[in-house]
Amino acid sequence: MSGPSLMDSLFQRTLEDLIKGLRQQLIGEQAFISKALEEIRKEIKSTDLSTKSTALLKLCYLSNLHFHDMSFAAFHALEVLSSPRFSHKKIAYHAISLSFHDSTPVLLLITNHLRKDLTSTNEFEVSLSLQCLSRIANVDLARDLTPEVFTLLSSNKLYVRKRAVAVVLRVFEKYPDSVRVCFKRLVENLENYDPQILSAVVGVFSELACKDPRSYLPLAPEFYKILVDSKSNWISIKVLKIFAKLAPLEPRLANRVVEPICYLMRKTGAKSLLFECVRTVVTSFSEYESAVRLAVGKIREFMVDEDPNLKYLGLHALSIVASKHLWVVSENKEVVIKSLSDPDPNIKIESLRLVMAMVSEHNVAEISKVLVNYALKSDPLFCNEILGSILSTCSRNVYEIIVDFDWYVSLLGEMSRIPHCQMGEEIENQLVDIGLRVKDVRLELVRVARDLLIDPALLGNSFLHRVLSAAAWVSGEYVEFSRNPLELMEALLQPRTSLLPPSIMAIYIQSAFKVLVFCLHTCFVRGGSTAGVSASASYESFDDLSVENGAGSTVAHGQTCTSAPITNESIVNLLKLVELALSPLLGSHDVEVQERARNLLGFVDLIKLEALNSSGQEENDSEQKGVEATKIIRMVHDAFSKELGPVSLSAQGKVPVPDGLTLNENLGDLETICSDIELPSSNTFSFGYPSEEKDVSSFSNLQIKEDSGQSNESTSLLAEHRKRHGLYYLPSGKSEVISNDYPPANDPALQGDNNDTASDLVKLTAESLVPKRKPNHSKPRPVVVKLDEADEKPVAVKHPESRDDSLSGAVLDILFGSEDILPTSSRSNLPSSNRKGKEKQHMITQVESKENVVGDGNSSSRRRKDHSHGKERRHRKKNAEERNETDRKEKESSSNHPRRQKSRQRAEEPLKVPPQTSVIPDFLL
Amino acid sequence: MGIRFILMVNKQGQTRLAQYYEWLTLEERRALEGEIVRKCLARNEQQCSFVEHRNYKIVYRRYASLFFLVGVDNDENELAILEFIHLLVETMDRHFGNVCELDIMFHLEKAHFMLEEMVMNGSIVETSKANILSPIQLMDKAS
């Protein structure tokens, strides 16, 4: 490195020069910055500390405001840190707190610098290093500097002590064992009357209590005193936060505290404190009627305030109340609804949440109507917010609140026509889902789908494509409810469908296939069997068909269907239309579209001859062919007419394992047998292609079902397998039948509703799943097929993180008066641990003696219990302990280890804390 | 940790001060500041000062050409944070005398130092203007 030249430092640009330079650059800013960075890189290597620190300062500026990496300067920052001059140190600390993090390599080197400054006599140096520690402390730093922080906690300089208190939070978090050393002193600071200290210490406890409130219950009296005495709003707010966490754990505490909080709420002039009182009451004291009433009064004042901030917070607080006291929302309905048209989108969303909280099965229709009107008027963002919340509220818990599905389905149709609607995917899912689950609504569903399909304008809106795909699927699957299949066919094959993406195009073609088969079946098979091919046959009402084909789906819609006649002529036209529309698609680039188009055209080819022939009068010939074609049509029709039902995720699990079947058997050799079979993906198992027998049906997802007309090798093999081992397969495709054998999990509902639904449901499916009906509605709620777990999210009980546990375990140990303390250095593997061990031990004995006074008999009995648990842990720790052998000998005390084990033990069972009652001081009792 | 970060941003969306109480990489910071600036600067005077962002809240306030944005945990008291911002501005005012964007630009380190006096580890430790400023004045005198 070149020596320090005077010229370098003389002509070094200061930060001010840099900023001025930057401000003059209107366009070439980047170039200017990279030049400056180059200079900095040079200057920072200088041995002159002034030059170095100026370079560092400039670098901080560029890093902080222009996002330039400064990690290369980490070591230089440490060099500046060692300067004796305070101004250099300040810059170095500034740079370090901005740029260091847990994986900075030179972090290890900073420990001694920090220790030196922490013990400095200059309070500003101490403060700087504390500040820095609060930003960068990791496990090692926290462990190694715990003694220094401990000392500073009782410093007589308020300025220092305040910061030491604040830094403790980070140290605890990183190194929970430090609690054993520092906690007592931290608590002592709670009794300090200086507002500076108090504010820091309360801040620390409010953070700690957030993570694990239970451990801090014993300190309730101290907090109570602060709450009553405090003059500072800042401190009161923090204490309220602590009580919001503690009160739900201990009703007697809540009883005691609710009065002062209400007093504060009435008395205070500060909105921030007032709001905190309100929030505390509504979150944690919601069973205190009078307190809630008072808080609700304040909330209302907030909501009608001119200030948008207060309005927002009022609505926000109201939504907290809503979960427990819905009446409060209804009382303030007008304000909430008015806020829906507020100029502020955040306020609108907050009030939307509240409106949705009010929704029940009685008012869902009116509220949705109002909201859809709002959606029509609002900007795209809020419009979709509204639609999204309507959709999620209505579909909650398998459409729990929907009674009139006809209404809901038409609402879905209406929603998709709203110009800004971007909820296509959700609407798609719900349309299909409702189709599968609710049989009674299919007629209306098909009508809605037809209206959507037939409108050519909708095809141009790419947000609607998903909805159209659902509409196409629905009208194909439930074509027997359609009033005019021919019209449907035209809609499905209209020229503008070319605007659709291929995946949806494929669904359109498949649906067209189904509709075509249906028409042919109506015309030839139904008609053919009676009076030959005649126009009259096609007047056959469709609901008759549905009774026959749809097996379970017997819904009488006799009067509703005024079917358009399907004549021979119209069939010929239909076939022509199909050929015309699909032949261009044979050249499609998308395999799915191409293949399906080819399938359909192939089918048309098969049928066409027949259709044309029969229109002519060559009786003899066509008789033979006609039979053949009819057979084909019938077979394909049967394939399509099988009901698809929702499948429970846990359906497989309900199959009892037959005797003699070992599920854990190694199936390795199976692979060699069926190596050439590609197994279908996990959730689709399909077997059997269409045959006359109804009970060999497919139990699969849509795609497989739709394609079941084409058998391939794997399905036939599977069918073979099924024939041989039929016993291990699910008995049938219908979920209803499954429920017969394996009672669903939500049995109680089934039993509960059995009485009032029994008679008219028998003829549907006697064992239909959970026929949910509310007898008091004028229109009975249709059956919604529900599957047990499939619709319930498993409730995972989240346990607090182990780190917190170890922290709280340590805190509890201290609070419940333990006698001995884990030597902090016993874990350390650093070579210097011996030396440190000594000074720590000294300090620890100090604390120990103090705690001996407080310790109660409780702890000794607990410890005895823990001895038994300790064994295996001790064993596991052997290695670590051997390493620390020397260390241990030095301060050998048999009690150390059980202590440590105890805290671990506790950490695993945080609730096995000795009853709080014994610890909470008298005044609460 | 109550406060997660404090930003000062001018009308053009340029960051003038950034203080984070949890470590973020430069890329994360750049993305975060971009998102926040887009969200908050588009809002007008009639709208409230709280914006939900990711899993926390931003409380902001505009003083002349400068936006003060504070990212806080969801259960932090929004009004108290607004008071904190006001206190910060008043403190700077007292020190710089009618503080403006340039003061903060040219005395970035000092502004950071003031913040450090007021906030530690994400929680507010000092709310008295005199207490915040006295070490700074001492240091100014010394140098």
Image (tube, coloured by chain):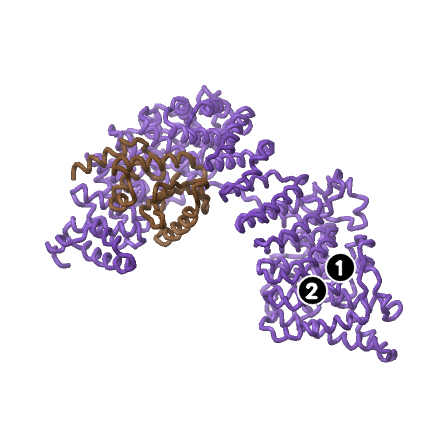
Chain colours: A purple, B brown
Horizontal and vertical percent position of residue A591? 60, 71
The vertical placement of A736 against A624, above or below, is above
* Amino acid at circle 2: Ala
Horizontal and vertical percent position of residue A186? 34, 30
Q: Chain of mark 2?
A: A
Residue at image mark 1: A482
Query: Mark 2 near mark 1, Cβ–Cβ under 8 Å?
Result: no
Q: Most extreme residue toward the right, as rendered? A: A531
- Taking A106 as reference, is A337 left or right? right
Residue at image mark 2: A491
Horizontal and vertical percent position of residue A501? 59, 65
Is residue A719 visible in this depiction of the protein? no
Query: Residue drawn at (73%, 47%), measured in percent from left and top?
Result: A783
Is residue B22 visible in this depiction of the protein? yes
Looking at the rendered structure, the number of numbered marks drawn on it comes to 2
Query: Residue drawn at (86%, 68%), measured in percent from left and top?
Result: A529
Q: Chain of mark 1?
A: A
Residue A177, numbered circle: none
**Measured Cα–Cα span from mark 2 to mark 1:** 13 Å
Quadrant in the picture for residue A269: top left
Query: Residue drawn at (49%, 36%), measured in percent from left and top?
Result: A311
Please identify, in this view, whether the residue under mark 2 or under mark 1 is nearer the observer. Answer: 2
Nearest the eye: A359 or A82: A359
**Label 2 CA crowd tier, 10 Å (few <14, some 14–19, many 20+):** many
- Taking A133 as reference, is A869 left or right? right
Badge 2 and badge 1 both on one subunit: yes
Please report whichever mark, 2 or 1, sits nearer to the chain's N-terminal start. 1
Horizontal and vertical percent position of residue A921? 44, 22
The quadrant of the image that shows the N terminus of chain A is bottom left
* Amino acid at circle 1: Ser
Kindly state the secondary structure of the residue where label 1 is placed. Answer: loop
